[in-house]
Image (cartoon, helix red, strand yellow):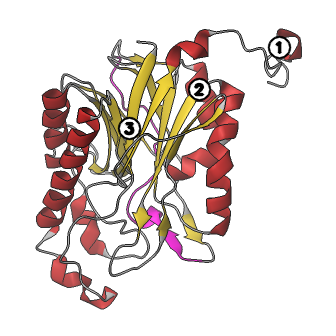
Amino acid sequence: MSTLRAAMTQTVNAYQAMPDHIDDLPSLADRLDDIRDANLDHHADLIATASNAGAKIIGLGELFPAPYFALHRHPMWIDCAEDATDGPSIARMRKCAEQHSIVIVAPIYELCAQTGERFNTAVVIDSNGAILGKFRKAHIPHGANEQGAFDESFYYGPAAKPYNDSSPKILGDNPLLPVFDTSVGRIGVSICYDRHFQAMAKGLAQAGAQLIFSPAVTFGEKSRRMWAIEFECDAARHNVYIGGSNRAGSERPWNQDYFGASHFAGPQGKIESISDSANLVIADLDLGALDKPDTSGWDLARDVNPSID
C-alpha cells in the first residue's frame, strides 16, 4: 500500500458526570468502570467515523479511557490500571479493529500482570483484532510548567526492561523501542514526553518505521510553539511520517486547557487534515515517497561520520 489514509483522535474525557471541584473526586471511586465505559463508547464511535471516511489506521490519545488524572496525586486513579492483553479497554478495541478492519494504536494505563508494575502503554492492534505488541512510555515527566503540573511518576514508571515477545511482527533490535509490522505499514510509537528526545524518532526510523504515532496530553506556551515544529523537524530529519495527537479542550475538575492542534507531518512538512470532525484528524500519507531518492541534500552519503552519528 503506497498511500495510507491515517487518523488520530483529538478529544477529552467523555464521562459527563465529573465533579466541579477536585475535593469531590473521591465520589467517583466506585464509578471508575463507568468512566472507562463512557470513553470506550466515545472512541468506538470515532473509530467507526474514521473507518467510514476510509482510514485504515487510527491512533488514539494518551491514556484515552480516562481523564488525564496526572495533574495531581490521587490514589483513586491507580485503580484505573488494567491488563494490556485481557483488560476491558483492549478487549473492546480488538473488537473495533476486527469490525472495521482498521489498525488501532490504543494507549492505556497498564497494570503488568507479571510484576504488578504500572506503565503508560500503547497497545498496537492489527486490522484482524490481533495484538501485535506494546510500547511503554520511556520518559516520565515530573514537575510543572507555567500552567500546571505533571505528576506522572506517582502513577507509573518508565519502560526499563524487555517486555515484547520475539514476534516476527516486531521489528528492530531494541525491545524497548519496537516497530510493528502491521497490515498497513511499519508503525512506531513515542508517547508524549518521549517526543523531546531525538533518539526516539531516530531509533524508530532506523528500525524501519514509516509512521510514528505520538499520543500526548500537553499544554503550556513553549509546548504549543514546539508542537507546531517539532514533528516536522523529526519527520524531515529521519524520513518518516509522524502523527501528534493532543487532547483539545479541558476536563473537570482540573480545568486545564489542552490546546489540541493534532496533526500529521512528513518529510515535506505538515499534512492538512481532511476530517469533518473536530475530534478526528485524517490525512493521506504517501508511504511510497519514503523510498524515493531525497534530492534535498539533507542525507548525502558523504556527510555520514560514523564516529559522530
Against 68, residue 128 (above or below) is: above
Residue 246, horizontal then vertical, whole percent: 46, 55
Closer to the camera in the image, 139 or 163: 139
The residue pinned by badge 3 equals: 7
Which residue occupies 57% across, 77% down? 147
Q: Residue at x 41, y 18 (%)?
A: 185
Answer with mark 2 or mark 3, whichever residue precedes in sequence: 3
Where does residue 88 sit, x and y in percent of width and height? Answer: 13, 48
Contact, CB < 8 Å: mark 2 with mark 3? no
Horizontal and vertical percent position of residue 259? 51, 64
- Above or below, comparing residue 212 to residue 68 in the picture: above
Would you say residue 300 is visible in this rendering?
yes
Q: Secondary structure at mark 2?
A: loop
Q: Nearer the viewer, mark 2 or mark 3?
A: 3
First of labels 2, 1 by sequence position:
2
Residue 150, image x, y percentages: 51, 68
Q: CA distance from mark 1 to mark 3?
A: 32 Å
Q: Is residue 27 left or right of residue 137?
A: left
Q: Which residue is mark 2?
A: 240
Report the magenta stretch's main SS.
loop
Q: Which residues are magenta?
A: 147-166
Image quadrant for the N terminus?
A: top left
Q: Quadrant of residue 28?
A: bottom left
Please give left or right for residue 45 compared with residue 195 in the image.
Answer: left
Label of residue 300 in the image = 1
In the image, residue 302 sits, relative to residue 210, either above or below, namely above
Gap in angstroms between the C-alphas marked 2 and 3: 16 Å
